Amino acid sequence: MSRLKYDPWILSLHLVDANGPRRVMMTPDRLSEILSAGRPIDTIHSVHVRGVGADPGELAELVDHGRMIALTGFPQRILFTGGEGMMRQEVEEVFRAFTAIEFTLPKDLRNQLLPFQQSDEEKLTDELEVWLRTIEYYARVKSAWQLSSELVVRIPQGNLSIDLAARLDQLSWREAFRVQRSGGASAFSLEQQQADYGMKLCEEPYRVVTFGACGQMTGCSGEQRQRVYFGSLEEDSLRGLWEGSSMESWRKNRTGNQCLGCPGLGSTLRRPSLISIYESVGEQRFHEYPQAQLRKIADESEGRSSSRSASRTIFCSPRKAS
């Protein structure tokens, strides 16, 4: 097993990528190559299956891909889906292939539900009903077969979540799934971190190894308009791509290029009492320590009590990936 310069926790795979009418599907050979390269990295414990502009449920080979990931030995395998195409899958086998299935609102449906959006009420009702019935059917199968995989439904924050939560509570087999409100960030919640000490950027460049459906390592598991690629495993090893000059440059300059305007990027507004720590250890090491300890250091410092010993303690040894 090997460790990388920045220890990633997640291998994120875009199995399908849609740009207008064009669809790119990740082939089994390409998936096998990526899994084989990622498995020796001992800090990666989770595989996330996603789509960009399309849904993994569209894949006829979704179950086969999920089985391949399971056989590779990653302990956590999470499928993110808006529900499109999921009723055409072998539902029991989807549960057996993934340790968790997370439903979110499809982008089109989410946009139609916005309060300022003018929508066709009949169409909106029909689409929402289809989404709810898909979740209900998956909950029924999970309950009937007593399957251990987790079923999660993520809904937006705000007033919309109240209505959706009420609708979800009315579904049969409600006890088989969990409802969770989503934050503003694409992968890591940043709102509380910014409020507490205002220095945390999105952790994906240090925590998430992302591959697109074409087999290129990319910089984000979100759906930003301007995407960036760093090469494929045909050109270099996973270590070479992850630690290469192109990705290192992107990590350092992302606040002013591809990530500019991303709601999940975070903030570099600096709480004065933490500036010296941030600048002495660097952004990546700063990310490795729990926010509660950083907040305590800042609070003690700004309260005119010494935080020097506390800061030395937590920065002696980085937190290990679990």
Image: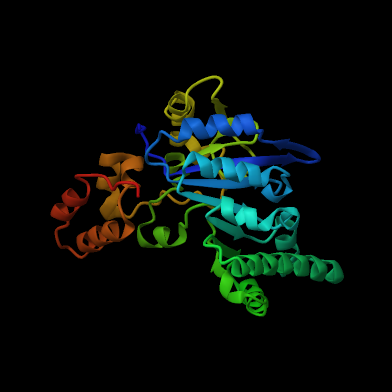
Can you give x and y, in whole percent of width and height, for residue 277 in the image? 25, 46
- Compared to residue 266, the image places residue 136 above or below, namely below
Q: Residue at 80% across / 67% down in the picture?
A: 124
Between 157 and 36, the residue placed more toward the observer is 36
In which image quadrant can residue 137 be found? bottom right
Q: Examine the rendering and report whether any part of residue 123 can be seen.
A: yes
In the drawing, does residue 183 fall left or right of residue 93? left
Question: Residue 180's quadrant in the figure?
Answer: bottom right
Within the image, what quadrant is residue 296 found in? bottom left
Q: Residue at x 58, y 68 (%)?
A: 157
Residue nearest the viewer, comparing 21 with 213 = 213
Quarter of the image containing the N terminus?
A: top left
Q: Is residue 84 left or right of residue 12?
A: right
Residue furthest front in the image: 145
Specify the farthest residue to the top: 235
Describe residue 23's horizontal placement relative to residue 275 as left or right: right
Question: For the image shown, how many numbered marks are present on the structure?
Answer: 0
Decide if residue 222 is in sight here.
Answer: no
Q: Position of residue 318 (x, y in %)?
A: 26, 45
Residue 138 x, y percent position in the rendering: 66, 64
From the top left corner, tell me how far across and down residue 249 is, in percent: 46, 29
